Amino acid sequence: TPIVLGLVAIITMFSSVVSGFILLLFAFFSAWYAYAVWNRVEFAVACLKVVISVFKQLPSPLLFNLLMAAASIVILVFDFMIFVAVAYSAQTAGAQGFIIFLLYALIYWHNIVTINVAHVTACSVMGAWLYNRSLDNVSLSSFKRAITTSFGSICFGALIEAVVRALSALLRHLERNAENQCTMIVLCCLRCLINLIADIISYINSYAFVFVALYQESYLESAKDCWNMFKTRGCEAIVNDDLTTIPLYLGAMFLVCVVVVVGMVVDGLSANVLIAITFALVIYFCSVYTLISYTKTLYVVWINDPASFKSNRPEEFAQIVEAAQNFGYDTNWVYSNQAYRGKPAAV
């Protein structure tokens, strides 16, 4: 990425010096980041090896990801039908803005809930494996918990993010209809700030729902436990997330290239190729999201309950600890006999 950004920056400078300089700064910071985290790659690779081996053994959450993706599309169609019918029915601008905000919140809420039902399902499956629970029909039982006992926590956490996302969408709507540039600039800055807050909430939720899946507790308790984890070892979580997702998303680019080449050889550049690319990407990203859920669960258990991890999966525990030690990570705490949370897993 730094090399590509650097080349693009040099080419851009021939047409716009300012844009080229900005891209060059991005290339510099990207190169610095790559240098700073390079020694952590082995730890991320060790985590990926474990979750991929588990995915080979327990791939069934992929089906629930596909199921929730289909459900999300169906719900989205109905939401947009309601949006088109209701959004511009108000008589005043204030009422119209309020209705648009509520509709945006509804659309985002439904979408985020379906995504996190699949996420909690996958986290429960990974938790069952980590704690050496029975794996008979584990995906189905995890899905049942996600849409019953954990559903309230999922909906509440998703609602918080949906409201913030809806506020951002409303600001975008107002920005497009602004009458002067000054107002547009203010609204744009506010929207950027709101988007940043929404991304932070989304990231915290991705770990809070791991606690919901593992310990069957309320969203607020899970968010509190998640925040405590971030206060102690949050930087490692962010870096590990970034390093483990890079190869997964690069795989999507590789997949598109392969499908395009094969499709053109077999049928030429046609609608069939586009359909094949769409289906391939849907299946691939459902697999990626399952792997991401597995990785987050692995990290949470390693941080919060190393004693149980060591006793139930000693081989994988040793691999991760060895990889962590190789980049100078202090792993003395993982040999403690007491779990960080002090609560047993409920998976």
Image (cartoon, rainbow, N blue to C red):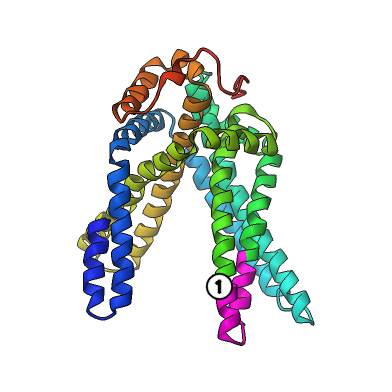
Q: Is residue 345 magenta?
A: no
Residue 206: x and y, percent? 54, 43
Locate the C terminus and report the quarter of the image it occupies.
top right
Quadrant where the N terminus is found in the figure? bottom left
Quarter of the figure with residue 191: bottom right
Which of the 4 quarters of the picture holds residue 5? Answer: bottom left
Q: Residue at x 31, y 67 (%)?
A: 23
Specify whether residue 176 is in view: no
Pick the front one: 249 or 267: 249
Q: Estimate the x, y position of residue 93 in percent, counting from the top left.
A: 75, 80
Label 1 sits on a secondary structure element that is helix
Vertically, is 284 above or below 92?
A: above
Left or right of 8: which side holds 225? right
Please give the residue where the numbered disc 1 appears in the rendered image. Answer: 188
Q: Position of residue 281 (x, y in %)?
A: 39, 54
Q: Position of residue 153 (x, y in %)?
A: 68, 40
Range covered by the magenta-colored residues: 168-187
Query: Is residue 180 one of those drawn in magenta?
Result: yes
Q: Looking at the image, which residue is at 55% across and 33% down?
A: 229
295 or 75: nearer the viewer: 295
**Horizontal side, residue 151 vs residue 19: left or right:** right
Query: Is residue 13 toward the left or the right of residue 226 in the image?
Result: left
